[in-house]
Image: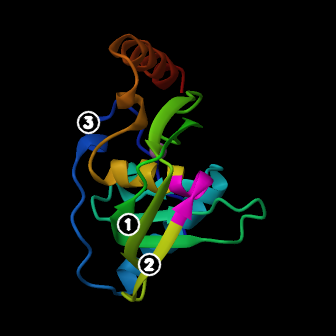
Amino acid sequence: MALLNILHYPDKRLHKVAKPVEVFDERVRKLVKDMAETMYAAPGVGLAATQVDVHERIVVIDVSETHDELRVFINPKIIWSSDERMVHEEGCLSVPGIYDDVERAEKVRVRAQNEKGETYEVDCEELLAVCIQHEMDHLMGRVFVEYLSPLKQTRIKSKMKKLERAM
Ligand code: NI
């Protein structure tokens, strides 16, 4: 296993659109393991392959307090979402230190595959619903700060550049 390098906003590679996974082989299973290890080490509750510069539709999430309920979403699709919306404060490993409110569907049903290629469906609510929508945005090349006002985005960009220089 290995820790992967996480891209930081406003890196252009975060805007690439991920491609579906077609072959569920050892390479995919190793990537999932490395992504999980990277997420736990950060620490974070979710990570999309896009964030580690792999542009394939793979997401790992663990919203449990005990950090032992890893969920793997490969080729995820939202097949139903509630009309009810919720506002939740979000953060992102690609935008360290920035937290802000984002409005999303309160509940979603997701169809995805696991690392063996088996299809499953899961109903997501609360933090899991926030997280899967946030991570699926990454796969489409979207970072959560893009929901914020242009002024906030400009401020965040300059903050990130300063941080990058300091590292
Ligand atoms: Ni994120």
Which residue corresponds to the image point at 55% horizontal and 33% vertical from the top-left?
96
C-alpha distance separating marks 2 and 3: 32 Å
Q: What segment carries the magenta color?
A: 124-129
Residue at the image point whose x is 33% and y is 85% from the top: 24
Identify the amino acid type marked 2: Glu
71 relative to 54, above or below: below
Kindly identify which residue carries mark 1: 58
Q: Earlier in the sequence, mark 3 or mark 1?
A: 3
Magenta segment main secondary structure: helix
Q: Position of residue 146 (x, y in %)?
A: 35, 29
Q: As rendered, which of 144 and 47 lies closer to the eye?
A: 144
Q: Find out whether the residues at labels 3 and 1 contact each other: C-beta distance under 8 Å.
A: no
Q: Are marks 2 and 1 in contact (CB under 8 Å)?
A: no
Q: Quadrant of residue 157?
A: top left
Dot 2 or dot 3, earlier in sequence: 3
Identified by mark 1, the residue type is Ile
Q: Quadrant of the N terminus?
A: bottom right
Amino acid of disc 3: Lys
Q: Is residue 54 visible?
A: yes
> In front: mark 2 or mark 3?
2
Cβ atoms under marks 2 and 3 closer than 8 Å? no
Report the front residue among 50 and 131. 131
The crowding category of the residue bearing disc 2, from other C-alpha atoms within 10 Å (few below 14, some 14 to 19, many at least 20), is some
- In this figure, which residue is indicated by the disc labeled 3? 12
